Amino acid sequence: MFKNYIKITWRSLLKNKTFTILNSIGLSVAFAVAILLSMAGFFDLSYDKFHTNSKDIYKVYSMWQNPKGPQVSVSHAAPLMPAIIDEVPGITRATRHLQQEAVLTYGEKEINMDAIWVDADFFNMFTFPAIKGKMNNPLEKQSDIVITEETAKSLFGDEEAIGKTVQIQINGKDESFTVGTVVENNPAQSTLEFEIAVRFEREADYLGSKDNWGARYHDIYLQLGENVAPSQFDIATRSLVNNNFKERIDNAKRDGAQPDADGLYYKFELLPLEDENFATFKNGYVQVSRSNVYLVLGVAFLILFIACVNFINMSIARSGQRLKEIGMRKTLGAKPKQLFFQFWTESLFVFLFSVSIGVVISILLIDEFKTIFRTDVSFGLILSPVTILLFMLGILIITFIVGGYPALLMSKLGTIQSLKGKLDVSGKNRVRDALMVLQFGIAILMIAGTLVLHSQLDFMRNKDLGFNKEQVLSFPLDGKKNSYDALELLRNELAGNADILEISGADNNLGYGKDGSVSSSMFGFEYKNRVINTNYLTVDYDYVETLDLELVTGRNFSREFASDRSGAVINEAMAKEFGEKDPLTAYISFSETLRFPVIGVVKDYHFENLDKTIAPITMMMSRDYDLYYGYVKVAPVNLAKSYDAVKNAWARVSPNSKFLGSFLDENINRTFRKEERMTTMITSGSILAIALSCIGLFAISLLIVNQRTKEIGVRKVIGASVTNITFLLTKDFLKLVGISFLIASPIAWWFMKEWLKNYPFKINLSPMFFVAAGLLAAVIALCTVGGRTIKAAKQNPVKSLRTE
C-alpha cells in the first residue's frame, strides 16, 4: 500500500510540474532561512550557559535613591566583597572582576592584552577549561597568571608556555608573573572575555582602595549555595548597607530623595548570570529583555508560516483539477482515510524534499550569514540528537496540519460531486482568503517595520552629535610610555604636516573603536549642602578644539594658565546641576579645601550612545590619571593620506604598539550594530515574505485564470475590453491586500511606537510609513497577478471558447 502511495505521489507531482516547483522553491528557501535564523536565535539564548554553575552565579548591583529618582550601578568598592562573604550566609564562592588592558612584555615582544583582575575563586566558579598547567585553583598564587591558547600562541609561538615569566606593567613599573595555566579560548557565547587573568590583589589601585568604601570601580560575582533564594539577598545585606553607607543615605534624605517601595534609600540586588547579556541599566532599573532574540525566531516562524500558507492555498486551488480522480477512487472503493493518506503523503514528500534542499542552502550560505549578522553560529547548535528529533517531529506535525487540511477537504467530498468536477475554487473560499489576508498582513507588517527601522537608523547616523566626527581620528594609547609624553612626541612627529590640524587625548573613546573597549567614570561631590553626580573625563590640552566642541561661556584649558590643571570645563547639562545664574562661579569640590573652579562651559554633545539622554560631564586635566586614547583632527582632504601619516608617526613613537586607529564616524556607526542587525534582518525577512506571498499569489491566479477561460471568452465576445477583464480578475486579490493593510497597519504602528520608546532621540512615526507599506504590497501583488491576467484577457475568444 505504501509503495502505491509513493508511486501515485511521484506521478502526481510530475504531472503538475509548475506547482511542484513553486512549492518546492518557496518551502526550500523558507526552511533555509528559518534554519539560519533559528541558529542565530538559539546562539544568543545560549549565552553563558556553558558554565557548569551558570544557574547559581549572580552579578551584584546596587540601587539607590536620589532627588531625580532611582539609580543603578554594577561598580563596587573593593571592601564590599569580603564584607558580603562575612555577613551574608549561603554564599559558596565570590570574586571581584575588573576588565582593563595591560601591557605584557616577553623578551622583545610588547603586547597590549585584554586582562581581567579577579579573585582566586574565579576559575572555580566559571567554566574555562584548563588544557595545560595547574588544573585546580590556578590563581591560588598571586604571582601566577592564566592565559588563553591564543595568548600563548601570540607570546610564545610553539614554545611551552607553562613556567614562562612575563612582565606586566603596573603603576608604571614592570612586575614579573609566571604562566601557571593555559585555558581554552573564550567561547563565543561568553559575556566574560579575557586574554590573561591576574589576581585582583595585584591590580594597580588595590592597595590604595582595599579599605575605601567610596572608590567603586569593579564588578562582583557570587555563587549561591543550594536552596538559597537570590530574592533574600537584599534583606541579608541591609545591616551591611546601614553600617557602611549611612552617610550616603543621610545625604539622600537631606537632598529630598524619596525611598523606594520598601522604604529603602540604598540596597543590593542580584542579576542572574544567564540574564547578563540581555540586561540594560536604564532609568534607574535593570531591564532584562530577550525581545531581539525572540524577534529573530519570530521572523523565522513567520517566513515558514507564509510558505506553509502558500502550500495550503495552492493545494486547495489545485484540488479542482483532481475532483474526477477523487470521484473515480471513491467509486472503486477507496475509503476517506486512504485518500487522506494519499494526499498527505504528497505533502510529506514535498516537505522532506524541501527540507533537504533548505539544509543544503543553509550550509552554503552560513558564512555569508555570519558576516552579515555578525554572529558565530554553527550547526553544532542544532546537531544534538534531541534537537534533530524535535526538528523531525516538527516537520511531521507541520505536514500533518498543512498537508492534512487540503487532504481532509478533498477526501470528504461526495462521490457524485467529485465525478461532476464541481468545486467552486474560483469563487468565495473563506479559508483561502483568510490565509491570504494573514499572509499579506505579515508582509505589510514587516515592510512597515523595515521603513521605520531604516529611517531611525539614518536619523541616528546623520544626527548632529555636537562634535566633529568626520575629521577626527581616535586610537588607543597602548605601550609603556607615559600617555602624556607619548602625545607630546606625536605632536613633534606631525608638527610639519599641514593636514594635521589638532592633537589631543582623553581617558575614554567616543563610540566603539577598533579595540572594542568602552568605559565611563562617575563621581559625586558636595556642593552647597547637596550631592551632585557627574560623568568624569580626563583630557589633555586642545581636546575642545580637536573635537570642535562649541564653547558657550568662559574659556577652554590653556597652556598659558598653569592653574588650569586645577580647573574644570563642563557641559550645559552639568551647568544646570549647579543651578547658578553664572556657572563660572561654581566649583568641583573634592574636600573643604580642595576646590576646582569651572572655567568654561561647552554646548551639550553626545559623549554616550544615542539611546541615552545627554548627561552631565566634567572635563579635567589631572595628571594623576592616564590618558587612554589619542585624538587627531585632520584636514577634510586626503583623509587616507592623513591616516597613514598618523599611523607611521605613532609607529615611531611607540614601535611595539599596534595602531588601532579609526575615524569617529566609524566609531559611532559601530554603536548602531544592534539596530543594523535588526534592520538587515527585518529587511531580508520583508523581501522574502513578499517573494513567498507572490509565489502563492501567482500560482493561485494561474489556476483561477485557467478555470475562468470560458468566462473571459464570453465577456470578450460581448464587448468587454482588456482593461475591464483585467480589473475583474485582479480586484478580488487587491481587496484582500486592502483588508490586510487595515489589519496590519495598527499592529505595525503599535510595535514601532513601543520600539522607538527605547530612544530619547527618534523620528516622528508618520502615517506615511504604513501607507507606503500598503501601497508597495498592493503594487507588487498587482504586478504578480497582472501579467497573467492581461495575457488571458488578450487571448483570442474563439480559441478560448473552442477549447472550453
Image (tube, grey):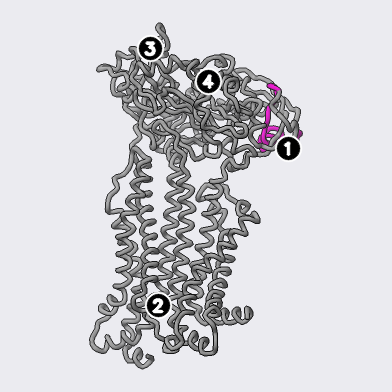
Label 1's element?
Answer: strand
Identify the residue under disc 1: 131
Q: What stretch is highlighted in magenta?
A: 141-161
- Give the residue drawn at x 74%, y 35%: 132
In percent of width and height, residue 107 lies at 70, 26
Please say whether residue 109 is visible from this viewpoint. Answer: yes
The quarter of the picture where the C terminus appears is bottom left
Q: Which of marks 3 and 4 is nearer the N terminus?
A: 4
Q: Do the residues labelled 2 and 1 touch (CB within 8 Å)?
A: no
Q: Which of 129 and 540 is in front in this view?
A: 129
Q: Which mark is residue 702?
A: 2
Q: According to the image, label 4 marks what residue?
A: 77
Q: Does the magenta stretch include residue 691?
A: no
Residue 752, how many percent across, how many down? 35, 48
Q: Mark 3 points at which residue?
A: 561
Q: How far apart are marks 4 and 2 (CA)?
A: 72 Å
- Residue 326 in percent (x, y) is at 49, 84
Q: Position of residue 492 (x, y in %)?
A: 49, 22
Residue at 46 percent of width and 30 percent of height: 509
Sequence-wise, the earlier of marks 2 and 1 is 1
Q: Is mark 2 on a helix, strand or loop?
A: helix
